[in-house]
Image: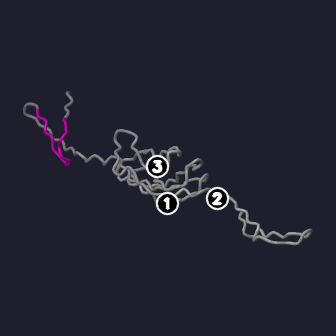
Amino acid sequence: TEPLTVDTTGVDPGSYTATVSAGDTAAERRFTIVENPDPAQFAVEITDINNPPVGERLEVTAEITNTGEQSGQPTVQLDTTAGEIEPTQTTVDLAGGESTTEPLTVDTTGVDPGSYTATVTASAGTGTETDENPGDAASFEIAPEDRPTADAGADQTVDEESQVALDGTGSSA
């Protein structure tokens, strides 16, 4: 008995018949070549982003979708154009066609107030995964830090040795 192998590289998916003959006898066997499933591919969409004041957390919510048929584990990363903010990342596990919503947060302490861009990417981790639409970007603002203000009211002229009443209702906490 000898095993026989057939290389199916370059052969279209479908059903085929193989005939093996030895002398006056022959045997036929059917075999089917199936199409390989599409590899994991990831699309990213930022669905929400806040505009925090300095010192509070930038919160970005992104939907990650595996548009392929195979499962995959992309690394989801949040980067910003604010140089003082370190990137943050997480890994998700997605079956083919599955989506997940991921919250990503970073601290804005030390960032100058201004306009910046946040980018969320989903990078494939292993050989069968590819990036179809690896990232999405959105603008955000870092507002000046909210500081309390003091307001003692309007200037007053009072008689000597009298009490002065100050009005602090214009102050903020």
Asked if residue 153 lies in the magenta stretch, the reply is: no
Give the CA separation, mark 1 to mark 2. 23 Å
Q: Position of residue 56 (x, y in %)?
A: 60, 53
Residue in the image at 64% along x and 59% along y = 146
How many C-alpha atoms fall within 10 Å of the one at disc 2: few (<14), some, or many (≥20)?
Answer: few
Residue at disc 1, secondary structure: strand
Quadrant including the N terminus:
top left
First in residue order: circle 1 vs circle 3? 1
Q: Which residue is mark 1?
A: 48
Q: Amino acid at mark 2?
A: Asp
Q: Which residues are magenta?
A: 6-21
**What numbered label is drawn on residue 81?**
3
Q: Position of residue 151 (x, y in %)?
A: 73, 66
Nearest to the observer: residue 54 or residue 19:
54
Residue in the image at 45% along x and 53% along y = 117
Q: Amino acid at mark 1?
A: Asp
Residue at disc 3, secondary structure: loop
First in residue order: circle 1 vs circle 2? 1
Evaluate if marks 1 and 3 touch, with contact meaning CB atoms under 8 Å apart.
no
Q: Position of residue 161 (x, y in %)?
A: 92, 68
Residue in the image at 50% along x and 48% along y = 82
Give the CA separation, mark 2 to mark 3. 22 Å
Nearest to the observer: residue 98 or residue 101:
101
Q: Nearer the viewer, mark 1 or mark 3?
A: 3
Residue in the image at 52% along x and 58% along y = 141
Asked if 144 appears above or below 77 in the picture, the reply is below
Q: Which residue is mark 2?
A: 146
Nearest to the observer: residue 20 or residue 75:
75
Q: Amino acid at mark 3?
A: Thr
